[in-house]
Amino acid sequence: MSTPILFGTDGWRAIIGEEFTFANVRRVSAAVADYALSCTKSPLIVVGYDTRFLSGSFARSVAETLTHYGCRVILSNKVVSTPALSSATVSHRAFGGVMISASHNPAFFNGFKYKTSSGSSAPEAITGRFEKFLQQTLPTVPVVHNDICFADFSSSYFKRLSSVVDLPLIRKSSVSIVADPLYGAGMGYLQSIIGRAKPIVTEIHGHPDPLFGGLHPEPIDHVLGDLKKAVRKQRAHAGLATDGDADRIGVVDDRGRYLTPHQVFPLLLHYLCSCKGMRGKVVQSISLGYLSERIARDYNLPFEEVSVGFKHIANRIMDQNPELPVLMGGEESGGYGYGNYLPERDGILNSLMIIEMLASTGKTLSRLLKDLEKKYGASCYLRTDIPNPGIPKSDFVKEIKNHIPAVIGGLKVVAVKDYDGIEFVLSDDSWLLLRPSGTEPMIRVYAETGSEEKTKNLILWGKKIVNNCIQ
């Protein structure tokens, strides 16, 4: 019996040729058609794809299946980022959008993301409908044939970006950037948006490669060795990397050091508050740390923590009270969004925001970080992953809760959070999170303290607890 098709924190992902096959992609597409046609007549769906193996062919199969069952379809005429696909969903006033991408997963994976009419990731209420339909044998919708339309989604996407970023300021600045799309969908975007005038944007890994040059297309520290070297060699002001579908960002400072999301998100948040005078609610995933909470407290901003998965932050952006709008939302994996934009994370938008921050302040990233940590404290964050043999999240949390310690690393455990994995908060704000992933067969161990040594010790403690639980 084949493995059931299930949607995780951001779509369905599987190994190409095993579970991710044309037959299964057509099945999921039929489920999307069934749902869309149950809501409206002749729904419009936009479809995009990234640089992964056969992504364009899978997208074509999605489009053909949707039109076969009575949907109207606009298919991207080239590789596109997930944020650009989300933007197209809104710009074309579509019922929904489908993106063929496995985001940051290894090259042998592909995925199927569904976006709502607002451009956000589908909530569980919708993906649950898909999963229920997939348990059926035959589709419940009539067979109709519509033509597939093709479009370039980039122009409307660039226009949307220009509405929230100060491009004139960026264009007249002397900031120099090295961009690293990691052979993925973000290739060429920054150059196209900014233009060939200053700031100078140099791109590495800027051609499509289904194998991502042998790299894992996730913009994290150990993947970005070439970017660090390029920044130091060119004496650039920053290195900006995006993942396979360009909805996440990784940042290297002017000294060639990787900055963690626990430093980047607070830097952006502080810039919005201190330099742009912006205010609003701050929303972040449970795994994003303490600096942003301290900044929110300093500026008297409402603060909320949610489960991992940007869809939870997107829900807060969409459900916001006009009197209490979301200023910014972020997650540990490098996905950040804004209340005055789409309810979607966007690696290109955040790249532009960092360039704007450098242009506006006239300071280097290393200087900005030093100033931030002088005021709000240092952040040393690490994460490691342990293969999950198949233990469900609920069973994992239950087992860990049976052995909650009073003290970890000499510090008192002052709070325990169990709404997404299990997190131990210590008396100095340091924390340790143990959490089975919703997108990969891994148990993630996260920790943040004020020093590298303390963080490493917390990680070692967490790995020991996880291994005892799964053995």
Image: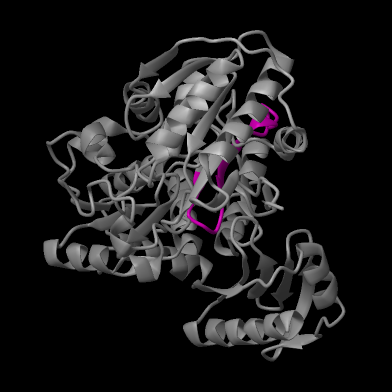
Q: How is the image coloured?
A: one colour
Image side of residue 13 versus residue 391, left or right: left
Which stretch appears magenta? 318-336
Q: Residue furthest front?
A: 1
Q: Position of residue 234 (x, y in %)?
A: 13, 61
Q: Is residue 425 above or below residue 365?
A: below
Q: Position of residue 206 (x, y in %)?
A: 22, 48
Camera-side residue of 179 and 448? 179
Secondary structure mostly taken by the magenta-highlighted segment of the chain: loop
| Residue name at image x 87 percent, y 79 percent | 402
In the image shown, does 5 or 228 lie closer to the viewer? Answer: 5
Q: As rendered, which of 314 and 264 lies closer to the eye?
A: 314
The residue closer to the viewer here, 463 or 345, is: 463
The verdict on residue 323 being magenta is: yes
Percent position (x, y) of residue 314?
62, 38
Confirm whether residue 258 shows in the render.
yes
User: Residue shown at 41%/40% (left/top)?
Assistant: 55
In the rendered image, residue 471, in percent from the top left (x then y), is placed at 73, 84
Instruction: Based on the picture, tell me whether residue 391 belongs to the magenta stretch.
Output: no
**Identity of the residue drawn at 44% across and 59% down:** 106
